[in-house]
Image: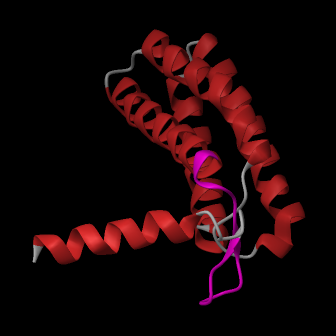
Amino acid sequence: MRPLLKLMAAITVATSAFLPAALVNAADGARHTPASDMKAQHHTMETIGREWRKIGKALENKDAAAGMKATDTILRAAPNIEKFMPHRNPDKRDRFMDYYGMFLQQLIEFRTALAQGNIVGASAISGEAEKTCGRCHALFR
């Protein structure tokens, strides 16, 4: 079986030079960006996800400083979203950017609430931000 796998790998490498940079996903017609862009996109989302989990723990522990630190990390990573190509529905990019704008606004409001020591208010805002993420993921992921 190993020789077959090696042959398949060699064929994949040999033919990849002839494939277009943006491949069409037959299931929904979505265009994906080159692998390097997708890697950066996934890295950004992993960073946001990791920091969002830290925010959840910070809220549970009523630790505003930890919440602000995680939020700052997300705010530094978030501008990368502007370059994203959605996995699905790329023709609705304006809506994608609307969700991005809502998320940024919610992050700023969230951080402001934390800076004021308003954990209850921050928790409510984080719930709204999670809904925004869910709506965006439902349409574009």
Q: From this viewpoint, which residue is outermost toward the left?
A: 1
- At horizontal 38% and vertical 36% (from top left) the residue drawn is 53
Asked if the magenta segment contains residue 129, the reply would be: no
Q: Residue at x 78, y 71 (%)?
A: 90
Residue 125: image x %, image y %? 62, 40
Res 105 → quadrant: top right
Residue 27 forms part of the magenta stretch: yes
Viewer-closest of 96 and 106: 96
Q: How is the image coloured?
A: secondary structure
Specify the farthest residue to the right.
94
**Residue 89 picture quarter:** bottom right
Which segment did they paint magenta? 23-36
> Where residue 4 sits in the image (x, y, percent)?
20, 77
Q: How many marks?
A: 0
| Side of 135 where 92 appears, left or right | right
Residue 112 coordinates in the image, percent (x, y): 69, 19
The part of the image, by quadrant, that contains residue 63 is top left
Q: Quadrant of the C terminus?
A: bottom right
In screen coordinates, is 24 left or right of 50?
right
Residue in the picture at 85% in, 74% down: 91
The front one of 6 and 104 is 6
Depth order, front residue of 107/29:
29
**Residue 67 location, x and y as percent?**
48, 20
Q: Is residue 99 left or right of residue 19?
A: right
Please tell me whether residue 50 is drawn above or below residue 14 in the rendered image. Answer: above
Q: Up-down: is 13 above or below 31?
A: above
Residue at 10% x, 78% y is 1
